[in-house]
Image (cartoon, grey):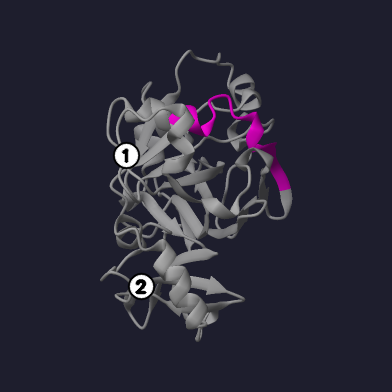
Amino acid sequence: MKFISFAHNGQKKFGIINNNKITDLTGKISNSNTLKDLISNKGIHEAKIYAKNNPGDLNVSDVEYLPLIPNPGKIICVGLNYSEHVKETNRTVEENPVIFHRFPESQTAHLQSIQRPVVSQSLDFEGEMAVIMGEGGKHIKPDDALNHIVGYSCYNESTVREWQRHTRQFGMGKNFEKTGSFGPHMVLAEDIKDYKNLTIETRLNGKVMQNAKLSQLIFDIPILISYVSKAMAWRAGDVLVTGTPGGVGFKRNPPIFMKPGDKVEIEITEIGILSNTIKDEII
């Protein structure tokens, strides 16, 4: 079952999508007005029953996608988490995960434009799988970590490369407005038998740029959830962005960066395709 966040007639909503028809769940399950609310209110099961009894009557073509979780409490990102990406960046595998953060204001959505800022022409793609947390908690054991996940989605963690390299901290290059695309929808964790069997692929104008299996993660998802939880409590609706495979644009010869008019797609098997075009920031 697939959950989405969207705008319709100027109002922000969320619902379940099936065969391009949307069942609007806004305010109908435990007074939940956002997908984050629904997760926090433990309303997923009730939402599934409601959608079964109330088939969608809203066409997906009549709505505008929003970032899957427009208002997460935190977005935790992981760097250097595939061996090929570590190798191409001339880094070494660290003892602990490389963790940095994104802010909600940096996000955009499926079929919306990723924005190339006026201060840079080095906007790079980074296809990643996003994990949406359902059950919060601190000091989570790796063996229990998967039970804290409500669903999975796609993320394009687009990066402004020279700003990322201004200092040893990644943050500035990762938080430009409308660069982190999130969606198109959330597939429930219960519908994914084993995330390690999934494949992720990034395509730029139809050409495959990145391809990997989720089994290739250096620090797997339970380890990441447990590690972060030792410092801060996970809360419902928080997002974990798990890292990008090798093949990024700035390490190619010559480098390949995204430019206005380009189309970039992130596809994860059993989850879906996140699609965006690129446009320049207007000031």
Q: Earlier in the sequence, mark 2 or mark 1?
A: 2
Q: Is residue 238 left or right of residue 270?
A: left
At 28% from the left edge and 47% from the top edge, which residue is drawn? 73
Task: From this view, report whether residue 145 is shown above or below residue 57.
Answer: above
Residue 48 position, x and y percent, is: 47, 69
Q: Can residue 279 be seen in this view?
A: no
Judging depth in this view, the residue of 228 and 245 nearest the camera is 228
Camera-nearest label, 2 or 1? 1
At 50% from the left edge and 86% from the top edge, which residue is drawn? 57
Residue 47 position, x and y percent, is: 42, 69
Q: Which amino acid does label 1 sit on?
A: Trp
Q: Which amino acid does label 2 sit on?
A: Lys
Q: How many numbered marks does the figure carry?
A: 2
Q: Is residue 122 left or right of residue 226?
A: right
At 59% from the left edge and 16% from the top edge, which residue is drawn? 90
Q: In this view, does 141 lie to the left or right of 202?
A: left
Residue receiving disc 2: 13
Which region shows up in magenta? 208-224
Q: What element carries label 2?
A: strand
Instruction: Identify the disc placed on residue 277.
Output: none
Residue 135 position, x and y percent, is: 36, 46
Instruction: Identify the disc placed on residue 234.
Output: 1
Classify mark 2: residues with Cα within 10 Å, few (<14), some (14-19) or many (20+).
Answer: many
Q: How far apart are marks 2 and 1 (CA)?
A: 24 Å
Does the stretch in magenta take in 195? no
